[in-house]
Image: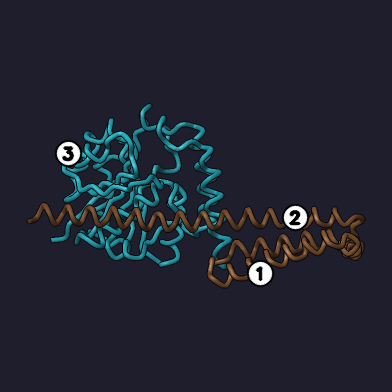
Chain colours: A cyan, B brown
Amino acid sequence: MTTTCAVVPVYNEAAVLTEVLASLARVVDEIICIDDGSSDGSSKVAAASGATVLRHAINFGQGAALQTGFDYVLRSTQHHHVVTFDADGQHNPNDAARMVAEAQTHGWDVVLGSRGARDSSMPASRRAMLVGARWLSRRMSGLTLTDTHNGLRVFSRTALAQIHLKQVGMAHASEIESLVARQGLLWTELPVSIAYSAYSLDKGQSNLNAVNVMYDLMVARLRKPA
Amino acid sequence: MIIRLLLIASVLAMLVVMLRATGSARQMAIRRIALLCFAAAWVAAVLSPSALTSAANVAGVGRGTDLLLYVLVVAVLLMAVGLNQRIGRLEERLLRLTRELALQSAERRGRDDDS
């Protein structure tokens, strides 16, 4: 029987982590939390919930935390499918379950969650920026996605082995897309709902961070001969 | 007039080269040689200001000190890029170390739980 796990990058989410992990635990066999150098005791909270906890002694970013989780899954577990899931309560475990089922039934390498082209619950400024991000991402990766920066994804174990994230920050989303395109992985999108709470919006990425993402991607491009 | 061409072309060329650099020992050796040449040129300029002025005139610059200033700006720019790259490489190494620590701690905990 094949098993499933969730990789949850955590940075100072002690306030909501117990609740998030409790509902997530119902749909996966193991939760792997990567504490990316939190200072609020997130590690202890995660461990108390029964999750497997890996801790970065220093904060690096969500991309780095995810890759550490991926390395752990490949090195120390036998799970066949991996869900990447946010720790701030924006993701819905039922969506994760649906995406895993989709991957298992149809043999997808990658299943990507999508907010869809018209998500009215999203703040207008964010929606406007994501339209631009979507256009740019399509041009850079060649994939026609409806949602280019959604943290809810499912990977098969074989797909995971081909992912080696170099981007430590939020540009990892674009890097994943480029990798999927370049390795010719079988991918699909499924509609998911994101719950925007005051807590998560407050903590979340500002639109200005898009500048940093663009810069990181451009520098990475310059380094490698195209 | 030539100086403008030289400066712009050299900066662009060196930026491209540096951004692609892998930080190998070769790069470091080249950089050190360049540094020594620069230091030698500086000493020569100080010892013989007229030589500096001649060099400046060849390049289309009026004063020797102006030439020195232009070259200095280029050198500082490249130094900044080089240092940034070095820091980037250090961060990568730091991340590899942090990741290995995280993975090994988890594995050890897993083994302790099973025993």
Residue at the spot 30% in from the left edge and 59% down from the top edge:
A71
Identify the residue at the far bottom of this view: B26
Q: Secondary structure at mark 1?
A: helix
Residue at mark 1 to residue at mark 2: CA–CA distance:
16 Å
Identify the residue at the far top of this view: A198
* B58 relative position to B33: left or right: right
Q: Is residue B46 above or below residue A133?
A: below
Q: Nearer the viewer, residue B96 or A192?
A: B96
| Residue type highlighted by circle 3 | Ala
Pointer 3 indicates a residue of which chain?
A: A
Residue at the spot 20% in from the left edge and 48% down from the top edge:
A52
Find residue A55 and report its horizontal and vertical position in percent: 29, 47
Q: Quick one: quadrant of the C terminus of chain B? A: bottom left
Q: Is residue B82 above or below residue A207?
A: below
How packed mark 1 is, by other alpha carbons closer than 10 Å (few <14, some 14-19, many 20 or more), is few
* B86 relative position to A195: left or right: right
Residue at mark 2 to residue at mark 3: CA–CA distance:
58 Å
| Residue type highlighted by circle 2 | Leu
Pointer 2 indicates a residue of which chain?
A: B
Give the mark toward the camera: 3 or 1: 1
Q: Is residue A112 above or below residue A93?
A: below
Q: Is residue B1 visible?
A: no
Residue A155 has which mark? none
Task: Using the rendered view, name the quadrant where residue B101 is placed.
Answer: bottom left
Q: Nearer the viewer, residue A110 or A189?
A: A110
Q: Secondary structure at mark 2?
A: helix
Q: Nearer the viewer, residue A189 or B20?
A: B20
Asked if marks 1 and 2 touch (Cβ < 8 Å), the reply is no
| Label 2 sits on residue | B72
Identify the residue at the far front of this view: B47
